[in-house]
Image (spheres, grey):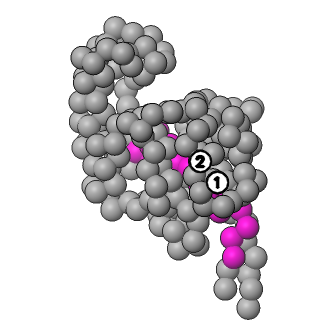
Amino acid sequence: MTIVTFPKLVFFDLDGTIIEPMDFEKIKSILNVRSPVLENILHDPLKMKILKEFEVEHAMKANLMPYAGEVIERLKELGIVRVIVTRNCSESVEIVCRRFGLRFNEVITRDIGHFKPSPYHVIRLIERYGFRRDDCLIVGDHMIDVLTGKRAGIKTAIVQRKCESADFVLRNLKDLLSIVKYDRKT
């Protein structure tokens, strides 16, 4: 029998981590805003509608990032709790999960408020599952993901990017499996 000692709960970003990243330069150009896009359009219903349409269209066309499906399935087999935490809309996450048959224990989107880099929902789920913060990891492709993890007091991993403040730098999601620590009980 295998007992995972770390991580017991993994928070995954969506774009650039689970699926190919969206073209944020194109989004900024269409919406005529600068980064961060979401904060700059939050109170503009028309621009929020355009962003949602862009996210949904992207979810219907994007490919999985290398090894994403296999890694998520392996974590499930190991009994690791898997959570999507994204600044995207819920509909885009539902499309991606349905298209690729991905299963997560929880999904956190901007639609429920307190979106990244707020650690609110990350901390809430850690407490709800009864884990220590040392038991948890957030995986993403952007500094916002690392910042969210740091604010929540959990370990951070960044994919395909250099980031001195991340605890782990992954070439791709397959590298995540080398982080998993476990005890074998017979």
Provide residue 55's location: percent of width, then percent of height.
Answer: 30, 33
Asked whether the residues under the numbered discs 2 and 1 touch, taking CB atoms below 8 Å apart as contact, a structural biologist would say yes
Question: Is residue 38 found left or right of 118 in the rendered image?
Answer: left
Q: Is residue 65 visible?
A: no
Looking at the image, which is closer to me, 54 or 23? Answer: 54
Tell me the element at label 1: helix
Give the quadrant of residue 140.
top right
User: Would you say 27 lies left or right of 86 here?
Assistant: left
Q: Residues within 10 Å of mark 2 (few under 14, many from 20)?
A: few
Which residue is located at x 46 percent, y 18 percent?
A: 39
**Farthest residue, direction bottom:** 186
Residue pointed to by mark 1: 127
Position in image of residue 38 (x %, y %):
42, 22
Q: Position of residue 68 (x, y in %)?
A: 47, 55
| Disc 2/disc 1 C-alpha distance (Å) | 5 Å
Would residue 147 be found to the left or right of residue 15 on screen? right
Quarter of the figure with the C terminus = bottom right
**Vertical placement of 19 versus 82: above or below?**
above
- Near-viewer residue (130 or 77): 130
Q: What kind of residue is marked 2?
A: Arg
Residue ID for mark 2: 124
Name the residue located 72 percent from the left edge and 51 percent from the top edge: 133
The kind of secondary structure element at disc 2 is helix
Looking at the rendering, in which quadrant would you find the N terminus?
A: bottom right
Residue 61 drawn in magenta: no
Which segment is the magenta one? Answer: 3-19
Residue at the (68%, 59%) spot, across then down: 131
Q: Nearer the viewer, residue 134 or 100?
A: 134
Task: Confirm whether residue 60 shows in the render.
Answer: yes
Q: Looking at numbered disc 1 in the image, what kind of residue is underneath it? A: Glu
